[in-house]
């Protein structure tokens, strides 16, 4: 910058240019059709999948209808049990056990807003799309 512009003003001009560049980048991203997804998705490499809580069984157990069409007994780990309640009809991410296919761990529970968003974006499998 030139020598007769105060230092504070130079800094403001610099920040203003950076914010304009960021806005232009965001506009380009939106034009390209890229969508920001703020909800976690199942990690297919680790065997995780979508499921719907079907029936509460008690003792931190829940019957889950999974995306592959199987009904599994899901175990709610303490990390989730203490932080959020899982009710019948909730969309969850489950990870089936490797040694016992009829049981699974519940990894994450979606809120209603997140489930509706995933449904609108056609991310949910057709057999689980009840939202």
Image (cartoon, rainbow, N blue to C red):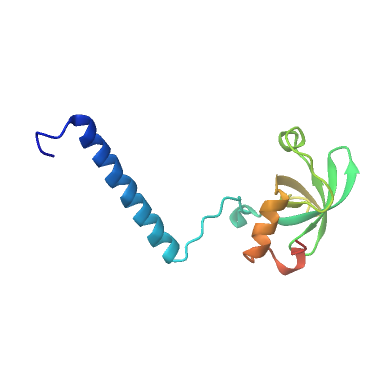
The one nearer the camera, 74 or 40, is 40
Q: Residue, x 44% and y 61% (percent of image)?
A: 30
Quadrant location of the N terminus? Answer: top left
> Residue at image x 79%, y 40%?
85
Q: Is residue 25 left or right of residue 93?
A: left
Percent from the top left, x then y, of residue 108?
69, 46
Occupied quadrant, residue 5: top left
What number of labels is visible? 0
Q: Quadrant of residue 8?
A: top left
Please, which residue is most extreme toward the bottom here? 126
- Can you say whether 119 is above or below 18 in the image? below
Horizontal relation, residue 51 to residue 35: left or right:
right
Residue furthest to the right in view is 57
Q: Residue drawn at (31%, 51%), measured in percent from left and top? A: 21
Seen from the viewer's position, the closer of residues 61 and 5 is 5
Where residue 2 appears, x then y in whole percent? Answer: 10, 38
Instruction: Report which quarter residue 50 is drawn in.
Output: bottom right
* Res. 48 in view: no
Quadrant of the frame with the C terminus = bottom right
The answer to which of 113 and 91 lies nearer the viewer is: 113
Q: Residue at x 62, y 52 (%)?
A: 46
Find the residue positioned furthest to the top.
7
Is 12 in front, or is 71? 12
- The location of residue 82, given as percent across then percent down, is 75, 32
- Asked if one can make out residue 41 in the rendered structure from this viewpoint, the answer is yes
């Amino acid at each position: 910058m030139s020598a007769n512009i105060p230092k504070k003003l130079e800094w403001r001009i610099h920040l203003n240019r950076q914010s304009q560049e960021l806005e232009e980048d965001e506009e380009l991203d939106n034009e390209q059709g890229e969508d920001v997804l703020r909800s976690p998705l199942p990690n297919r490499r680790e065997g995780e999948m979508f499921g719907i809580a079907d029936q509460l069984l008690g003792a931190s157990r829940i019957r889950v209808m999974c995306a592959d069409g199987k009904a599994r007994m899901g175990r709610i780990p303490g990390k989730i049990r203490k932080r959020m309640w899982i009710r019948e009809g909730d969309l969850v991410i489950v990870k089936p056990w490797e040694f016992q296919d009829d049981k699974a761990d519940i990894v994450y529970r979606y809120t209603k807003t997140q489930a509706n968003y995933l449904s609108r974006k056609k991310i949910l499998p057709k057999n689980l799309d009840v939202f």
